[in-house]
Every structure is written in C-alpha cells, then in structure tokens.
Image (cartoon, rainbow, N blue to C red):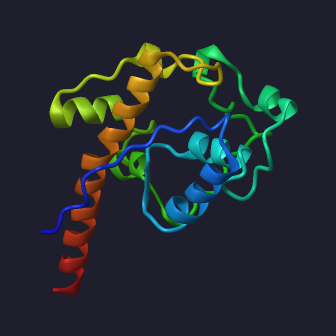
Amino acid sequence: SSKLLPPVIFLIDMINISDSTKNFIKNEILGKHLILAWGPSEDIRRLQLCGLLDGGGERNEKNEASKSSGKDNGGKSSNDNTNPDPPVPPNFLDLQLFFSDPRRLTPSLMATVTEQLDGRQLNKLVRTSNWDRRPLRPVQMNYAAEDASILFPLGEIAVEKVKNYESLKKS
C-alpha cells in the first residue's frame, strides 16, 4: 500500500496575505493538490474572502461584520439561512463526512476521532477563540499546526478505505 507524502504544513496569515503568496497558493497548492479539511465551510469562506477561491470576493469590513460572530464560535460564519455553506471544491476531501456515522444526527468531532485514533486531545478553548484578531497568539498558531497535522493520518485512512472499497467493487 502506498503512503501519502510526509506532511508539510504552512501557516499563512490570510488577513495580511501578499499578492505573490496569494498567487503561489492559488496556482501551486489549491489548484493542484488534494486539500484535506474537516468541515471545510469556514476554510472555504475565508479562502473566498481573501480571493483565493472564487465566490466570495475580496475581504471588506461589511462582509466580516456580517459573517463573523466573534468569540463564541471562533469567528466561524453563522449557520443561518442567509449564509448557506459554500460549495466544496472537487479537490477538497471533507474528512468530517468520511468519519461521521450516518446513523447519528450530528457530525463527528475531530477531537473525538483524534482521541480514539491516537489519544491526542485538542484544546477546545483555543478552537473557539477569536481567530480574526491579530496577531494570533502563539497558542493559536500551535493549535492551527496541530489541527492541520491531524488531517494527514486521517487522510491516509480515508484514502486507504476508498482504495479497499474500489478493489472490492472490481472483484
């Protein structure tokens, strides 16, 4: 069985992104690679706001005020009917869907899946902190890196299960 390449994690300040970094991300990463995500709607919204994905336009104060509700939900967009989740691009793999039990009404939490797989515990207080405030605190940057690193082994499990399913279908 083939393994994915070792993880490379980049933490990029999406609020203060330079044009050259934006072009690199858009052309060399987002357009060419499988993007692992856990419930990607907030990631997609932020990528759209800074112009890295189509559909959101550039960042402006009115967009930020209407789409971010602050501390209680970590700056995530509100889930009401006026702000539906953006469509997921075809190269994004939503691992939350992959690891959720279809018999449950609520999606699986990454913290629960991670703890079951390797015993790591994610700091929920950091997850729900204000991610729009700059500069990010060191604890937020560490959380972001750990959060991203967790996606790699989960992605390997998902890819392996899909390969096994495909080989079963052929036989």
- The image shows residue 64 at horizontal and vertical percentages of 78, 30
Q: Is residue 103 left or right of residue 170?
A: right
At horizontal 30% and vertical 39% (from top left) the residue drawn is 150
Could you say which quadrant of the image residue 144 lies in? Answer: top left
Q: Is residue 62 above or below residue 96?
A: above
At horizontal 69% and vertical 50% (from top left) the residue drawn is 19
At horizontal 20% and vertical 33% (from top left) the residue drawn is 116
Residue nearer the viewer, 78 or 67: 67
- The image shows residue 104 at horizontal and vertical percentages of 39, 40
Q: Is residue 82 left or right of residue 129?
A: right
- The image shows residue 55 at horizontal and vertical percentages of 75, 56
Q: Is residue 139 left or right of residue 154?
A: right
Q: Is residue 30 left or right of residue 111?
A: right
Question: Can the viewer see residue 23?
Answer: yes
Question: Can the viewer see residue 109?
Answer: no
At horizontal 47% and vertical 37% (from top left) the residue drawn is 11
Q: Quadrant of the N terminus?
A: bottom left
Q: Is residue 68 above or below residue 98?
A: above
- The extreme right residue here reads 62
- The extreme front residue here reads 20
